[in-house]
Image (tube, rainbow, N blue to C red):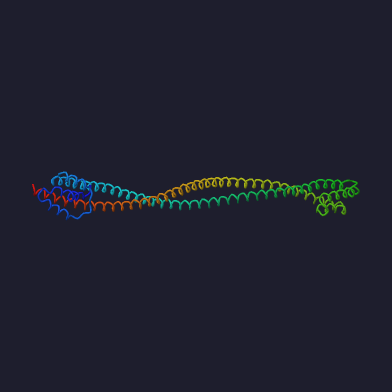
Amino acid sequence: MKAILILGLLVFGITAVELEAGVPILLKEIKAIKTDHTEFTFLLDLELSQGGKVSEVVALVGDLLEQMKRDQLNDDLEYAHRTTTLGLDIEWLIIVLRNLTKERQDKNNQLSELNQVLVGLQQQMDAITEQLNILNGKEEQLRQTRAQEAASYQARQENNGKVLAALNEIIPKLQVAVFDQEGKSLLQTEQFEIVEKIKRELGHNHPIAIMVAMTTKFDVPTVKRIIEKLEHIRNAVIALMQQEDEQETQSQITFQTQIQEIAELRERFSKDFEVTSQLIKKRTNDKVLLEKRLTIINRDLSLTEQLLIQTREYKEQYDAAYAVRKGKRISEIKTVQQAYDLVDNHAKKHK
C-alpha cells in the first residue's frame, strides 16, 4: 500500500459524508496536505460513497499506516540481512584475494628457486658430461698408445730375433771354420756365404754384417776376437729381448690398471649422470606443475577481483536503492500519518 490512498479517501470520500458535522473543515485541512500519491482512491471513494463513516475511514487509514510501517520494517530487516550477507561476501572475497596474492608470491619465489636449482643441476650435468668425454678421450688415447707400443715392441723383437738368429747361425760356423784343420779354405769359403746371408737378412750396412764381413780379411786370432765380440753382442741381444718382454708385460699391466681406473670413474660418473638426470626430470615436472598452479592462481585472482568489484558495485547500488526506497516510504508514512492524525482527531471531536 502506498501513502496517498489517504487523499483518495479524503478528497473523493469525505465529500460523500458531508452529513457528518465538521467534514467540510476536515476536507479543507486534508487538501492542505501536499502529496503526489493518488493510488487506492477508487476504493476509498467507493467506501464513502456507499455511506461509509469517518470512523471507518480512520480505521482504513490506520490499517494502511500500520501496513506501511510493517513494510518498512520488513524492508529494513531484509536490507540488514542482505547488506550483512554482502558485507560478509566482500570480506570473504578480500580474504580470498589476499590469500591468492600471497600464494602467487610464494609460488613465484618457489619458481625462482626452482629455476636456480635447474640451472645448477644443468651445470652439474654439463660438468659430468665433460668428465665422461675426457675419460673417453683418455681411454682412446691410451688404447692408441698401447697399440703403438705393442706394434713397436713386436717390431723390435722381430728385429732382435733376426739378429739373434743370425748370430746363432754365424757364430758356430765361424767357430767351426776357425778351428777346423782345413780352416783356411773353409774359412774363406763359408765366410763369404755367411757374409752374404747376413747382408741379405740384416742389410749391407748393419753393424753385424760389417763385422762379419771383416772376418774375411783378418787372420784367425783376429777372427776369434770378432767371434768373442759377436758372442757378447748375442748375449746383449738376449738380455735386451728379455728386458723388452719384461717392459711389455709391465706396460700391459699398467695399461690394464689405467683402463680399470677409467672404467671405475666412468661408472661413478655415469651413476652421477643418471641421478642428476632424474633430478632434472623431477624438478622440471615440479616446474610444470608450479607453472600450471600459477596459471590457475592468476585466473582465480582475475575472477576474484572482478567478482569483488561487481559485489561492491552491487552493494553500493543496493544501498542506494534502499536509501531511495526508504526515503520515499518514510515520506509516504509521514503523509499518511498526518492524514491519520487529522481524521482521527476529527472523529474524536465529533463523537
Left or right: where 62 falls relative to 202? left
Residue sitting nearer the eye, 184 or 69: 69
- The residue shown at (57%, 50%) is 129
For the image, the number of numbered tags is 0
Q: Where is residue 216 in the image (x, y as percent from the top left)?
A: 87, 52
Left or right: where 258 falls relative to 299? right
Residue sitting nearer the eye, 23 or 69: 23
Q: Where is residue 272 in the image (x, y as percent from the top left)?
A: 54, 47
Q: Position of residue 6 (x, y in %)?
A: 19, 49
Residue sitting nearer the eye, 66 or 139: 66
Q: Position of residue 351 (x, y in %)?
A: 8, 47
Left or right: where 173 falls relative to 147? right
Residue sitting nearer the eye, 258 or 189: 258
- The residue shown at (12%, 49%) is 18
